[in-house]
Amino acid sequence: MPPKDPLLETLKVCILNLSQSGSPVTDSCPHLSSCCELLELILRKGLQQPVLSLVQRDYWHGLEQLLQSDSCERLGSVSLAVEQTTSCKKLLTVQGRGRYFLRLTLQRRILGSVVRHMLHTPKVLEFYSPTISILRNEEFLEPFMSLLMVLSEMEYKLHIENCSFLDESWLLPVCETYEAVPCRQLGMVLRYVNGRVFVLDLLQGSQAEVDRFVQLGDIIDEVNGTSLRNASNGQASVVLSRLKGQPISLRVLRCRDRDGAMYRPLVKPLRLLQQENPAICLGSTNPARPTGTTQRRQDQSQCLREGRIVYIVQFLGKANIGMYGGKEVLQYGIPFVLERSDSRKEVLLDLKETHLTCTEKSTKLEMFQHHYPEISCVGRFSRPDYRIFAFCVADSPDSPMSTGFCCVVLQAASSHECEDIVSRIAAGFKHTEWSV
């Protein structure tokens, strides 16, 4: 049996889910960020760091070599994509430029062509280890190119200009355009945090308050095509003052996703702004304000890690539940695990944009990590109080011989928190069901 690479196997599942989510593929597709992250991991695998250099090498450095080696302008669309990425002022890091380039090549359906040019550029291949890299392993390269061909056959409709957060996250905010009529002033109170322009408040009776388009906590990303990424204090006010009495077009990055949940990379800066304006709400769109014991319990069941909310839950156990991983198995899979009476463990459940991790709280050791496309189903258990939840994953995803599905059972601090966790996991894969 030919060897299998876990990244390629996971990418295959992710592309299948992507193809089944409808055409064209848009930024709202829950599988897109997972697919992009896997492509990034593949391009980073086996990347060798220079011995005498203070700069951390990333795959973008190899992509830049394509442009430098194209003295006869043979690359065409590839060179144009590299040049557009290089000139984008919203990207401050090599990680952001690499991610922007991947999204751009997916949109233009030229990613396969890019990799072929990398394989024919000796300077680029020198970046990669011949023993570890997928790009220099003939057994893995062929299936990888086949997967890229499938990706190139899909149609994409991505908002390429929504790229200000690619430096730090594959998870993108909702991006919308606000067209304001000519007026003396819009009436927005702005604050600058980490090079971004936040809306702290709206003046009563102002144009911005009347239009009710911009919300507290939103980010002003552009003004009439001028980027405000990495803006210095007062820069947005200067730009707006020059446009007084003229039509204004603002590109706004929402602080909330379309489901009303807080855009997770903004939790930390918004907590700072909330100290100045308590009207900025970090809960759901219509939050029920907790008080007393409820508030204390919530504080004890959550913590912050790198700006993300991490849940403190109980790990109740896991068990193999057979060869089918649909949501129907949870009704007997959860009781089966509970009857085994495994010892409980207090763990930290971190729901990231593309995968979840579970870490033992006392020892800080990671117990497991699963990308959302690997999860076949998730659900709650009604007894005794809707706090127990579970999800199913392939028991041995890296093994050539499948051993079925594993049911992982945990318990949240409250039924509301349990519902929130299940909803966030389900949003990552839309209740995908598959069997082996």
Image (cartoon, rainbow, N blue to C red):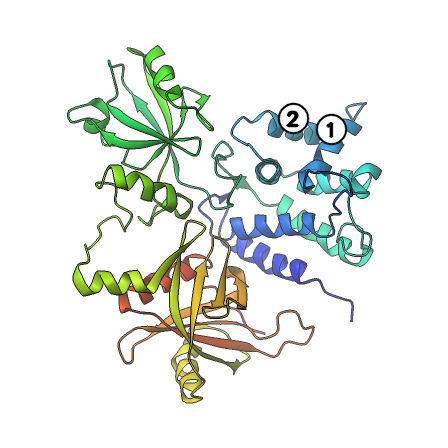
- 319 or 232, which is in the foreground? 232
Q: Position of residue 12 (x, y in %)?
A: 63, 58
Q: Position of residue 330 (x, y in %)?
A: 41, 77
In the rendered view, would you say 205 is above or below 284?
A: above
Q: Answer yes or no: do the residues labelled 1 and 2 have beta carbons within 8 Å? A: yes
In the rendered view, would you say 207 is above or below 123?
A: above
Q: Quadrant of the N terminus?
A: bottom right
Residue name at image x 33 percent, y 13 percent: 241
Residue name at image x 58 percent, y 35 percent: 93
Is disc 2 placed on a helix, strand or loop? helix
Residue 280 in the figure: left or right of residue 256: left
Residue 124 in the figure: left or right of residue 368: right
Q: Position of residue 397 (x, y in %)?
A: 62, 70
Amino acid of disc 2: Glu
The tag on residue 189 is none
In the rendered view, would you say 134 is above or below 154?
A: below
Label 1, residues with CA under 10 Å away: few <14, some 14-19, many ≥20: some
Q: Position of residue 283 (x, y in %)?
A: 27, 51
The tag on residue 83 is 2
Amino acid of disc 1: Leu
Count the numbered circles shown: 2
Residue name at image x 61 percent, y 40 percent: 102
Q: Residue furthest left?
A: 205
Residue name at image x 39 percent, y 84 percent: 335
Residue 405 in the figure: left or right of residue 430: right
Label 2, residues with CA under 10 Å away: few <14, some 14-19, many ≥20: some
List the residue tagged with mark 1: 67
Residue 364 in the figure: left or right of residue 414: right
Is disc 1 placed on a helix, strand or loop? helix
Q: Residue 200 is drawn in which quadrant? A: top left
